[in-house]
Amino acid sequence: MYRVTVTTDELSAALARVQAALTDTRPLMQDIGEFMQRSTKANFDAGTDPDGNAWAPRSPVTLARYEKNKDKPGPRPLIGPSKSLSTTISYEAEADEVSWGSNMIYAAVMQFGAQQGEFGARMGLNKKGRRYFFPIPWGNIPARPYLGIGTADQQAIGEIIAEYLGDAAGD
């Protein structure tokens, strides 16, 4: 049996950096979070899910509502006049994980969709003061996934990890 003992200061320092990098991966998670934040915002710009599939188009009812309010609906679904959803994408990096998304109350509905009445009903009053109930949401909302890791994202994250390990080794 052969044994190799490495005693060079340079290699020992590189191995120490790798060990430290594998102990606290928060910088890596921050890099991945920043990348996924940019990638998710790019999904809004393209109007597609993480794999490049186009989102369901706006419904005629939604388009009519924008015309009635004299707002411009924008070129893509999920981007309204305020651009609230697309501008609230953020990430949070921990020592061993990263999460990203939006804090908007309707963010999950936009990601996964919802069926008419899925969240119950709400009472309203008509012009004669009579109560009526309407479903929430009032119509079906198709899923328009904007969060996720697409094929190109997987490759880029692999490159970020490789660069992180290379930097940790001093390469």
Image (spheres, rainbow, N blue to C red):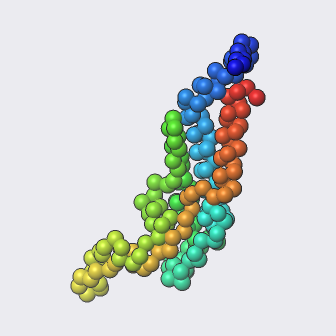
- Image x and y of residue 170, in percent: 73, 26
Task: Let me know if residue 9 appears in the view.
Answer: no
Give how far across and how far down residue 18 sits, in percent. 64, 27
Residue found 67% across the figure and 35% down from its top: 164
Q: Front-most of 8 and 146?
A: 8
In the displayed orientation, state which residue is furthest to the left.
130
Pick the front one: 135 or 111: 111
The quadrant of the picture occupied by the N terminus is top right
Is any part of residue 112 visible from this angle? yes
Instruction: Give residue 139's position: percent from left, percent from top.
Output: 42, 79
Asked if 132 appears above or below 151 in the picture, the reply is below
Left or right: 98 as drawn, with respect to 126: right
Q: Is residue 151 left or right of residue 70?
A: right
On screen, residue 95 above or below 32: above
Q: Residue at horizontal 74%, vertical 13%? A: 8
Q: Position of residue 168 (x, y in %)?
A: 67, 28
